[in-house]
Image: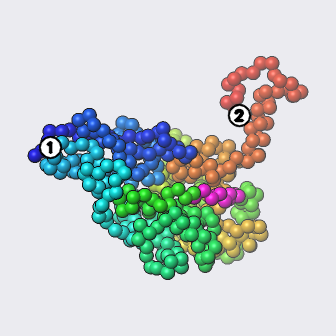
Amino acid sequence: MKSNQTLTILFWHRKSKKDANGLAPIICRISIDGMEEELSTGRKAHVDNWDNATKRVISGQHAKMTNSLINRMQVDLERYFTVLQSNFDVVSPLKLKNVYRNLPHDHRKGQTANTTKKKISLLELADLQIKEFSDLVKKKLRSSETLKQWKATKNKIAEFLLYQYKINDMELIDINYCFAQDFLTFLTVKRSPVLGEAAAIKQIKSTKQLLKLAETNGWISKNPIEKFRCGADEPEIRPLEISEVENIWHHKLTIERLDKVRDAFIFQCFTGFAYQDIYNLSPLHIVTVGTAHDKWLIKERGKTKVTEMVPILPIVEQIIKKYSTDPYCKINNRLIPVNSNYRYNCYLKELSDICGLSRELNSHLARHTFADIMLNILDFPLEDVSKMLGHKNVRTTQRYARVKKSRIAKKMHAAKEILFDSNGLLRGKMKVGSFIKI
């Protein structure tokens, strides 16, 4: 018999439970004829990224995945409700919640559930994530570089299982809290070669994400390493001083391959583009902007899919002109010739020695140097630097561009001229608008 009950499903953001990072859980409220039950989605979203009108996440790293889960939950709940209506005169929200969670329909909190859940191993879970991510890469919704990182995570988990437990795979139900600490110790101490702490923590975070996926799908009741803290101090990357950049640019090079590598590195220092993005730059990415017809480089960043836009400075234009007739660039429709990532970074180390620098060069250092030049030398606001770097939020940019004493000193000098006269006495009359000049 099918009842005439009405089901309402509402997804809402429990902002009162936000954590220190501003992330709050997304809750599903099941309502049937005035009766209600809440069901956790297992997902969180930043308080600034939730749209109350659409009840969906509008931005953020996992926005599409979270919205996909929400859509799937709604469809599944409606389907289960239809089935329950065919078997019961009255369907309660608790009954629907139990069936959705693969529990007996009359299950009560505190009871031991006898249910048969799908069994899946840890490496099978990794394979599933890699397959789903590969599909997103094919549709150009995710970066192929991130896919490589997921494959690397699977390989490192396999290494750890063989070393620590002498097994080729592990059932999810056998994983406990100690797994995360043991995995971290393996990566930073016992593995050969060992990983730096920041790189190792990244692998733990990826593993936590895998287990969160298993929890969301009901393959485990709870993520066993959810509370493991991944708060290793991020190593501060010291950008190049502008004098060091000038040294590299003006150094006489007699080796053609190093000359090309130097040009690519300087190009990065004055555009902020990552290796992946300068490698794929073509003349189509040069766009004329405004009534002054200024030339800009505008491109969707490969990693984040955020549009990065940077005005072409004279030094960048000089490099582009230099390679306008280069055979490699003409055949491959590229702006500048760039080696493979491995060779590029190897040649940069060689370039560092030739230029007499006291530190190694790498492609990512150029990106940090660009951020430093824009913020501390050219006085661009942090929000503008974030847009040029193609970051999704300013918090990421803060790790790239740290305010230097020179910037504070320059601002304070301007403030002194507004607040005090030439004798150091506080001015009698000051216009509030004057502070805008600082």
Q: Secondary structure at mark 1?
A: loop
The image quarter containing residue 129 is: bottom left
Q: Disc 2 or disc 1, which is closer to the eye?
A: 1
* Quarter of image, res 429: top right
Q: Is residue 168 above or below residue 226?
A: below
> What residue is at 71 percent from the left and 21 percent from the top?
431
Q: Residues within 10 Å of mark 1 (few under 14, many from 20)?
A: few
Can you name the residue that lies furthest to the bottom here? 166
In the image shown, does 398 or 294 lie closer to the viewer? Answer: 398
Is 167 rendered above or below residue 228? below
Question: Residue 421, relative to residue 16: is it above or below?
Answer: above
Which residue is found at the position 73% from the left and 56% from the top?
Answer: 242
Q: Residue furthest top?
A: 429
Q: Residue at x 74, y 38 (%)?
A: 411
Query: Residue 313: horizontal and vertical position, in percent?
Result: 62, 52
Q: Position of residue 217 (x, y in %)?
A: 35, 59
Q: Earlier in the sequence, mark 2 or mark 1?
A: 1
Q: Start and end of the magenta stretch? A: 230-239
Tell whether position 107 is magenta: no
Q: Looking at numbered disc 2 in the image, what kind of residue is underneath it?
A: Ile
Task: Tally the numbered discs.
Answer: 2
User: Which amino acid type is shown beneath numbered disc 1?
Assistant: Asp
On residue 89, which mark appears? Answer: 1
* Whether residue 165 can be seen here: yes
Secondary element at image label 2: loop
Label 2, label 1: how far apart the Cα atoms are = 72 Å
Q: Is residue 19 above or below residue 171?
A: above
How far across and how far down the image is residue 146, in percent? 48, 64
Question: For the stretch drawn in magenta, what is the main secondary structure?
Answer: loop
Residue assigned mark 2: 438
Please indicate whether residue 35 sits to the left or right of residue 164 in the image. left
